[in-house]
């Protein structure tokens, strides 16, 4: 009989939200989470598949923890990567089926993330002791932070991406359900609401859009902050800009995925917006709220990316005063359109381009951080000595504050990744 479980999560905020869902689902079936895989009867590997690197990490973990130990354990692989290997998936990529046997012989079950609620059934977990759970969206690590998936999947079919195949087409969670979960969270001392979706700002329900949803959340009584990740430029409206830059409950930070600054590459990526559209969004945001932080994603070395295309990405980052970039070196993902393109940018060039962007944004960020020293910022205290600013920086607190409170913190130092304050 399964009594304990351990979840190892790789990848983005969506995967973290999924791991919270699995945690809560198993908890309602009276299983207990343990902090070491060694003590677990059931191990869940929740994986990303956007980049080859994530798959290598899973394989590396299996080797590190010595495969024979898995003999007595149930090991479930789920998330994007599992979907790529799953025989029942719409996207059957035969070469991966063979690879799976060879590379991950210790995995006992593959689970389509879209069928996650079937996990207890699949594993034969009885639900006699079913514990009622009001929501399956809370962040299990901190009661003040709530991650709420408001949509699943994606219908955009960017040429490099396998999400529409692995996670299916866009499915929006009805507004009523989201509001119920969020209200519940706020009533239980929740302070930071993070709405999640592959393209969170593309959410719709019965003719209502993300602005309508955010306005309703904002109206809920209580002291709390709202943010949402990650946004697609094509659906970033002026109305949305106006709301988040002028209303107090919204964090003054947004992650908007640019992917490239070159119109030619954006077209090849099937991104459905131009460089000018992205710059226009950022300029409008900064005009309305000059201290608003913008972060983004950029892929370097997309097939046929020239030095001129790359320089367009650099100039876009500079022009938009982007403070942080998640950089992906292009790697062909089986099943995507770009898999059949000629991956003609040499690895070393991809690496150099990655380094150029990294250095550029590090400089921008360091400058921004240094300028904050001596200033006071509103900070939500997440743990006694860690907080999140109103601009979504992490802050190390040199003094202990009450968890869940919002404090005015004087910034007195900074590191590469965050701020230090008292
Ligand atoms: S918008 Fe594009 S990159 Fe993002 S999940 Fe959808 S297909 Fe993938």
Image: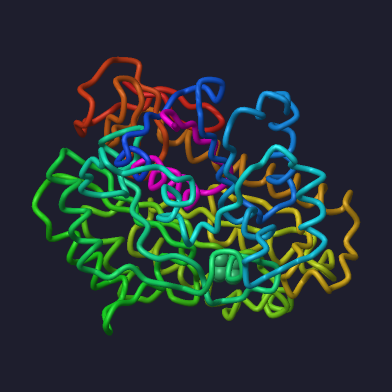
- The N terminus lies in quadrant: top left
On the image, which quarter does residue 272 sit in? bottom right
Image location of residue 312, percent across then percent down: 71, 67
Which one is nearer the viewer's eye here, 80 or 221?
80
Asked if the magenta segment contains residue 54, the reply would be no
Is 70 located above or below residue 293 in the figure?
above
User: How was the colour assigned to the protein in this rendering?
Assistant: rainbow
Asked if the magenta segment contains residue 19, the reply would be yes
Check the image and name the residue furthest to the bottom: 207
- The C terminus lies in quadrant: top left
Check the image and name the residue furthest to the top: 399
**Residue at 73%, 70% in the rendered image:** 335
Check the image and name the residue furthest to the left: 221
Is 209 located above or below residue 124 in the figure?
below
Which one is nearer the viewer's eye here, 37 or 420?
37
Is 69 located above or below residue 370 in the figure?
above
Q: Quadrant of ligand 1?
A: bottom right
Which one is nearer the viewer's eye here, 310 or 195?
195
Image location of residue 280, percent across then percent down: 49, 73
How many tags in the picture? Answer: 0
**Residue at 38%, 47% in the rendered image:** 21
Image location of residue 179, percent across then percent down: 20, 61
**Residue at 33%, 67% in the rendered image:** 173
Residue numbers of the magenta segment: 1-24
Which one is nearer the viewer's eye here, 146 or 233?
146
Image location of residue 155, percent across then percent down: 53, 76
Asked if residue 99 lies left or right of residue 88, the reply is right
């Amino acid at each position: 009989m399964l009594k304990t479980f351990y979840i190892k999560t790789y990848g983005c905020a969506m995967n973290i939200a999924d791991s919270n869902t699995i945690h809560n689902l198993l908890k309602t079936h009276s299983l207990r989470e343990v902090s070491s895989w060694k003590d677990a009867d059931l191990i869940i590997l929740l994986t990303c598949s956007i980049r080859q690197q994530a798959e290598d990490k899973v394989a590396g973990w299996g080797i590190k923890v010595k495969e024979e130990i898995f003999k007595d354990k149930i090991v479930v692989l789920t998330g994007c990567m599992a979907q790529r290997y799953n025989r029942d998936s719409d996207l059957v990529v035969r070469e991966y089926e063979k690879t799976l046997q060879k590379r991950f012989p210790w995995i006992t079950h593959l689970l389509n993330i879209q069928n996650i609620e079937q996990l207890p059934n699949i594993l034969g977990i009885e639900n006699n002791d079913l514990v009622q759970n009001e929501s399956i969206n809370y962040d299990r690590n901190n009661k003040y932070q709530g991650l709420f998936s408001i949509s699943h999947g994606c219908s955009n079919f960017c040429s490099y991406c396998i999400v529409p195949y692995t996670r299916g087409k866009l499915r929006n969670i009805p507004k009523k359900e989201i509001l119920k979960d969020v209200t519940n969270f706020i009533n239980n001392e929740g302070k930071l609401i993070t709405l999640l979706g592959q393209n969170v700002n593309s959410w719709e329900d019965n003719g209502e859009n993300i602005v309508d949803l955010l306005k309703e959340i904002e109206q809920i009584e209580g002291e709390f902050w709202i943010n949402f990740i990650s946004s697609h430029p094509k659906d970033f409206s002026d109305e949305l800009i106006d709301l988040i830059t002028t209303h107090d409950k919204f964090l003054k930070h947004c992650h908007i995925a640019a992917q490239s600054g070159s119109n030619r590459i954006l077209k090849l990526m099937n991104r459905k917006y131009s460089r000018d559209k992205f710059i226009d969004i950022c300029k409008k945001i900064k005009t309305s709220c000059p201290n608003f932080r913008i972060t983004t994603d950029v892929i370097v070395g997309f097939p046929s990316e020239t030095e001129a295309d790359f320089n367009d990405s650099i100039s876009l980052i500079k022009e938009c005063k982007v403070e942080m970039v998640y950089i992906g070196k292009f790697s062909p993902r089986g099943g995507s359109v770009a898999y059949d393109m000629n991956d003609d940018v040499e690895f070393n060039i991809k690496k150099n381009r990655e380094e150029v962007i990294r250095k550029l944004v590090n400089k921008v960020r360091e400058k921004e951080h240094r300028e904050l020293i001596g200033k006071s910022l509103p900070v939500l205290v997440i743990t006694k000595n860690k907080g999140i600013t109103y601009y979504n920086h992490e802050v190390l607190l040199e003094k202990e504050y009450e968890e869940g409170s919002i404090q005015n913190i004087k910034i007195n130092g900074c590191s590469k990744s965050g701020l230090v304050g008292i």
